[in-house]
Every structure is written in structure tokens, then in C-alpha cells.
């Protein structure tokens, strides 16, 4: 009799355990499906230095001109909110006045969709180069941004040097590969370098690939060194090293005051765009 009861209890326990395991599996599958089906939130992170100090190889140093550059770029990107941007994070590291930028956002009724990380002190690191200072800025932004944190796991951050406008950003986002940790654009011709004007990553990808780069490289944090250094640092992560489309950038280049969208610079852009289609193996 006791043996029969014990056998029956064991049978009930096994049935209950199987049921619970199946239920847990269903819940896990539902969560995974929900993550896959939920739309990706695309956040634009605009980096800014309105008042540079002792910056090497920098011709565009006038704070008034630079602020106007940021104003024009921000005005353009506000038009991409919900088409396809979830929001914008504007982060500035020279402790400059951004009142006019805040007023621009408010005038468009988008204050809830733009986060300003500004006036937290001067953090320029000018003696170590602009790229070093920008990565220090990014480390701060990716830790401090409420928008990035609240976006959850299913989001991508698109970083742009804030004075520049990527005219085809919407199509750049639409054509991006799925399931990357970081998405960058590397060049081999006429020289080896990595374009750091526009980059994209997930929060996990940033922590794995980019966080602490400035501290590790110090003054070697620049476009040429990053071309060979970053793939080594990203081993084991999903680094996509080449854009599928050419970003059409408008804006005045900092080191010589030439405009990316005029004259020979625009011609180069069209040549590189054609090259991505006709000779995708030739990274220029």
C-alpha cells in the first residue's frame, strides 16, 4: 500500500515538474519573441564641443560659428524624430551655454524627445587630441543618458559628430545589418583609417568594444590607429567594419574649414558611393 502511494506521488511530482518546465519554456520563448517583434529604438547621440581650447590641428575654433553649426544640425535631426529616430541625446564637454539649442527643441514641441547632457564641467583633454576627448565624452554619455538606459535592450545608438548633418541618415539606418554589436566604416585606400564621424552600436556592444578606449590608447586615440586596433579589441563581438551605404555628410570640416558637401569633397562622396556597389571589396 505504501509502495503504491509512493509510486503515485512520484508520478504526480514528475507530471508537475514537466508542466512547470514546459511553462517556463513557453514564457522564455514568449519573451524572446517579444524582443524580436518589438521595434528597435534608434537613438542619435550628437557629440559637441562648442568652445575648444588649445585643440591641435583645428581651424574652426570660433564658439559662435560652432554653436551655429550645432544649431543647424540639431534642427535637421529634429525632423527625423519618429522617422526613424526615437530620440536625440546631445552631449557637450566644454561647459558652454546651450540655451539657444534648448529653445530650438522647445519651439518644435520636442523637449521630451531630446536629452541634453551639458554643463557638467570642462572635459576637453585637448593635449591628447580630439578623438581622445570624444571617446571620454562617449563614455560619460553612455553611462549618464537616461534615454539610453530607459530604451532597454532593443535599441541602437547612432553617434554623429554633432556639427555634421548626415543627409541620408534615415536610409543608412534602414540599410544597416541586423544583430550587430557595432557598425563602423573602415577604409584601406588611399590610406588605412576608420571614419569616426558616424558610428553605431548597442549598449552591450559599446561596453564590449568601445568603453575605455581613450584610457587604453591615450593620445593614440585617432582614426589611423583605430583602423587596426579596433578589430583586435572587438574579437568575439559582432563588429561590422563597413557601411553598406555611403553617408552623405554636410558640414564644415574642423581642421580646414572646407565643406564636405561642396566641390571636390562632394565628388569624392559620389565616387565612394559608386565604389560600394561596383567594387565592394575596395574600401576607400
Image (spheres, rainbow, N blue to C red):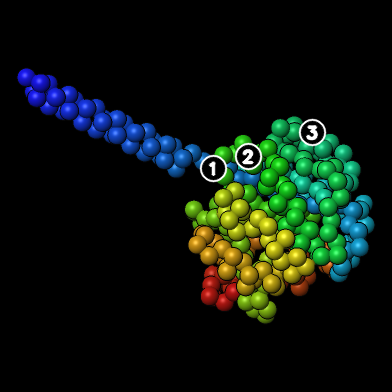
Distance between the alpha carbons at the discs numbered 3 and 2: 23 Å
Distance between the alpha carbons at the discs numbered 2 and 1: 9 Å
Give me the residue at 79% from left, 55% from top. Answer: 163
Give me the residue at 73% from left, 39% from top. Answer: 115
Q: Are marks 1 and 3 in contact (CB under 8 Å)?
A: no
Residue 221 shown left or right of residue 280 in the figure: right
Local SS, label 2: helix
- How many other residues sit within 10 Å of disc 3, few (<14), some (14-19) or many (≥20)? few
Q: Which residue is mark 1?
A: 153
> Disc count in the image?
3
Q: Which mark is residue 106?
A: 3
Q: Position of residue 126 (x, y in %)?
A: 85, 61
For the residue pair 246 and 207, the one nearer the viewer reads as 207
Local SS, label 1: loop
Q: Position of residue 242 (x, y in %)?
A: 57, 66
Q: Are marks 2 and 1 in contact (CB under 8 Å)?
A: no
Q: Which residue is mark 2?
A: 149
Q: Nearer the viewer, mark 1 or mark 3?
A: 1
Q: Position of residue 200 (x, y in %)?
A: 62, 55
Local SS, label 3: helix
For the residue pair 59 and 205, the one nearer the viewer reads as 205
Q: Quadrant of residue 271?
A: bottom right
Amino acid at each position: 500500500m505504501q509502495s503504491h502511494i509512493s509510486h503515485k506521488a512520484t508520478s504526480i511530482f514528475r507530471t508537475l515538474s514537466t508542466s512547470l518546465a514546459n511553462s517556463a519554456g513557453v514564457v522564455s520563448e514568449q519573451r524572446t519573441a517579444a524582443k524580436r517583434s518589438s521595434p528597435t529604438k534608434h537613438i542619435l547621440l550628437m557629440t559637441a564641443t562648442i568652445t575648444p581650447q588649445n585643440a591641435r590641428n583645428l581651424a574652426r575654433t570660433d564658439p559662435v560659428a560652432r554653436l551655429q553649426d550645432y544649431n543647424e544640425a540639431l534642427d535637421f535631426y529634429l525632423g527625423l524624430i519618429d522617422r526613424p529616430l526615437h530620440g536625440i541625446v546631445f552631449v557637450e564637454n566644454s561647459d558652454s551655454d546651450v540655451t539657444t539649442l534648448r529653445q530650438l527643441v522647445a519651439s518644435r514641441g520636442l523637449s521630451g524627445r531630446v536629452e541634453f547632457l551639458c554643463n557638467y564641467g570642462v572635459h576637453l583633454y585637448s593635449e591628447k587630441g580630439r578623438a581622445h576627448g570624444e571617446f571620454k565624452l562617449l563614455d560619460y554619455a553612455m553611462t549618464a543618458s537616461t534615454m539610453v538606459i530607459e530604451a532597454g535592450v532593443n535599441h541602437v545608438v547612432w553617434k554623429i559628430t554633432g556639427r555634421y548633418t548626415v543627409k541620408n541618415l534615415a536610409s543608412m539606418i534602414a540599410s544597416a545589418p541586423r544583430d550587430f554589436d557595432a557598425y563602423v566604416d573602415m577604409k584601406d585606400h588611399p590610406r588605412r583609417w576608420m571614419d569616426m564621424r558616424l558610428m553605431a552600436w548597442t549598449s552591450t556592444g559599446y561596453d564590449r568594444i568601445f568603453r575605455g578606449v581613450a584610457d587604453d590608447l591615450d593620445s593614440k586615440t585617432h582614426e589611423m590607429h583605430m583602423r587596426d586596433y579596433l578589430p583586435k579589441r572587438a574579437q568575439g563581438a559582432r563588429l561590422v567594419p563597413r557601411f553598406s551605404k555611403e553617408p552623405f555628410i554636410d558640414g564644415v570640416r574642423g581642421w580646414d574649414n572646407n565643406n564636405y558637401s561642396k566641390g571636390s569633397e562632394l565628388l569624392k562622396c559620389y565616387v565612394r558611393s559608386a565604389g560600394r556597389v561596383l567594387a565592394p571589396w575596395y574600401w576607400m
